[in-house]
Image (spheres, helix red, strand yellow):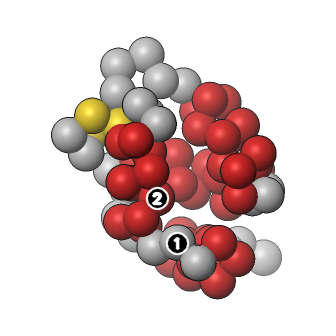
Amino acid sequence: MLISFKAYIDNIKIKTGKTPADLKKLGEENGFLKKGELAEGIKAGQIVTWLKDDFDLGHGHAMAIYALFKGKTN
């Protein structure tokens, strides 16, 4: 069974209490994003590690946030 991108994002909000906008703001504060865009040189693994460590997200959910940071919207 495939989980939709929206379902991943919805589950992340339930688990963390953070909206996509909240996570983007935190991504900016942590240097992963600059002006809403993925910062130069930032790799998926860096974001996955941050989200696993700080929010206890699994790999799939963390990759959904990485995709969000890269501009995916649905």
- The residue to which callout 1 is attached is 18
Residue at 42% in and 65% down = 22
- From this view, report whether residue 50 is shown above or below residue 64: above
Q: The residue under label 2 is which amino acid type?
A: Leu
Residue 10 lies left or right of residue 48; in this view the side is left
Question: Image quadrant for the N terminus?
Answer: bottom right
Question: Image quadrant for the C terminus?
Answer: bottom left
**Disc ID at residue 61:** none
Q: Position of residue 49 (x, y in %)?
A: 71, 37
- From this view, report whether residue 73 is shown above or below residue 32: below
Residue ranking furthest to the front: 29
Q: CA distance from mark 2 to mark 1?
A: 6 Å
Q: The residue under label 1 is which amino acid type?
A: Lys
Nearer to us in this view, 7 or 18: 18
Residue 16 lies left or right of residue 31; in this view the side is right
Residue at 35% in and 19% down = 40
- The residue to which callout 2 is attached is 23
- Asked if disc 2 and disc 1 are in contact, CB closer than 8 Å, the reply is yes
Residue at disc 2, secondary structure? helix
N-terminal of the pair, mark 2 or mark 1, is 1
Total label count? 2
Residue at 39% in and 54% down = 24
Q: Position of residue 61 (x, y in %)?
A: 67, 60
- From this view, report whether residue 63 is shown above or below residue 74: above
Residue at disc 1, secondary structure? loop
Q: Answer few, some or many: residues within 10 Å of disc 1's Cα (few below 14, many 20 plus, some between 14 and 19).
A: some
Residue at 35% in and 27% down = 39
Q: Answer few, some or many: residues within 10 Å of disc 2's Cα (few below 14, many 20 plus, some between 14 and 19).
A: some
Q: Is residue 73 visible?
A: yes
Nearer to us in this view, 32 or 60: 32
